[in-house]
Image: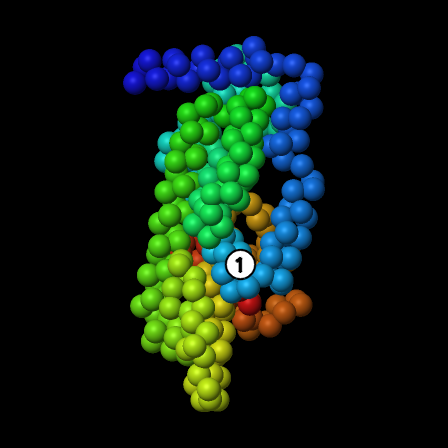
Amino acid sequence: MGWIQQLDTTAFHFINRDLSNPLFDRVMPWLSWNRFFIPALILVLGYLFWHGKARTRIFVIVLLITIAIADGLVANPLKQLFARPRPFVSETGVHLLVGEGRSYAMPSSHAVNWAAGATVVLIYGGTRYFLFIATIGIFVGFSRIYNGVHYPTDVLAGYLIGALSALATVNIIDVTWRYAGKRLFPTWYQILPSLKNVVVHANQFPNKVDPTLENLQWLRLGYLLIGITLLFRLWYIAKPIIELSFDEAYQWIWSRHLALSYYSKPPMIALVQRLGTLLWGEYRTRGEIFSRQC
């Protein structure tokens, strides 16, 4: 394994220092991140969802779910597991062109997300669109090395992990729909029996839809969206990026000294926070889970 690490380090210094030039110094940081990317992505996906047919709309939904899972549930835990320092921490003479990230290096989240997105595009859009997205993803991965924030193996591992996680996510979504859709959304399932190989069976549109069943399907979808939103909020609250606000700080103090009322609030906030700390301990974020859901 020592020769792999040596090769990795040598390749990093070659890309980061030996290939350094004024043009790349301007282009590569822009490729890694720029202020136009998110607005452009929202516009493109919004247009596709609004004007596209069933396959295109499902593609947009699956793409967003896949990238969220690949980034939040796969890449970030693996970073903590491998705990590999970034090159500007462990190497000397690094040509650093972007901000120092607070997370670990392995795998590159940029590479994971682009590979996951490209894989979903390949499944739903074919090789032509895949080659376009994959080419951009390769340049972005190269920019992460050139900018001094990742080793080459971080990027290569990210591509592999992103592709595998996307394949797994798409197939899990499809299998889940085949199993649960038939039972919970029978009318919709009859029209769209697969979310991976999307073929709308127009001849399966029922001539007369049972209003009770249709309303029940929409109600079940509403419950599902509420559950997903709740899980997302719990996951987001558990991340250590949210600091205590002034109100939360003194309301947490109330939870340590229960009373019938407080200066500006009735006792329920203190009771809820106290319940959170009893269930999950005194760790600050877990104690806030209930209160921030209110």
Q: Residue at x 34, y 70 (%)?
A: 180
Q: Position of residue 242 (x, y in %)?
A: 57, 49
**Residue 43, above or below 87:** below
**Residue 165, above or below 160:** below
- Location of the C terminus by quadrant is bottom right
Q: Residues within 10 Å of mark 1 (few under 14, many from 20)?
A: some
Residue 176 sits in quarter: bottom left
The secondary structure type at the circle numbered 1 is: helix
Q: Residue at x 35, y 17 (%)?
A: 4
- Between 272 and 11, which is closer to the camera in this rendering? 11
The chosen color scheme is rainbow
Q: Position of residue 204 (x, y in %)?
A: 41, 77
Going by the numbered disc 1, the residue's amino acid type is: Thr
- Between 35 and 118, which is closer to the camera in this rendering? 118
| Residue 207 in view (yes/no) | yes
Q: Position of residue 110 (x, y in %)?
A: 52, 36
Left or right, 208 with reference to 100? left
- Location of the N terminus by quadrant is top left
| Residue 185 in view (yes/no) | no
Q: Residue at x 43, y 64 (%)?
A: 199
Q: Position of residue 189 (x, y in %)?
A: 39, 73
Residue tagged 1: 56
Left or right, 20 with reference to 158? right
Left or right, 214 with reference to 186? right
- Between 101 and 116, which is closer to the camera in this rendering? 116
Q: Residue at x 48, y 35 (%)?
A: 111
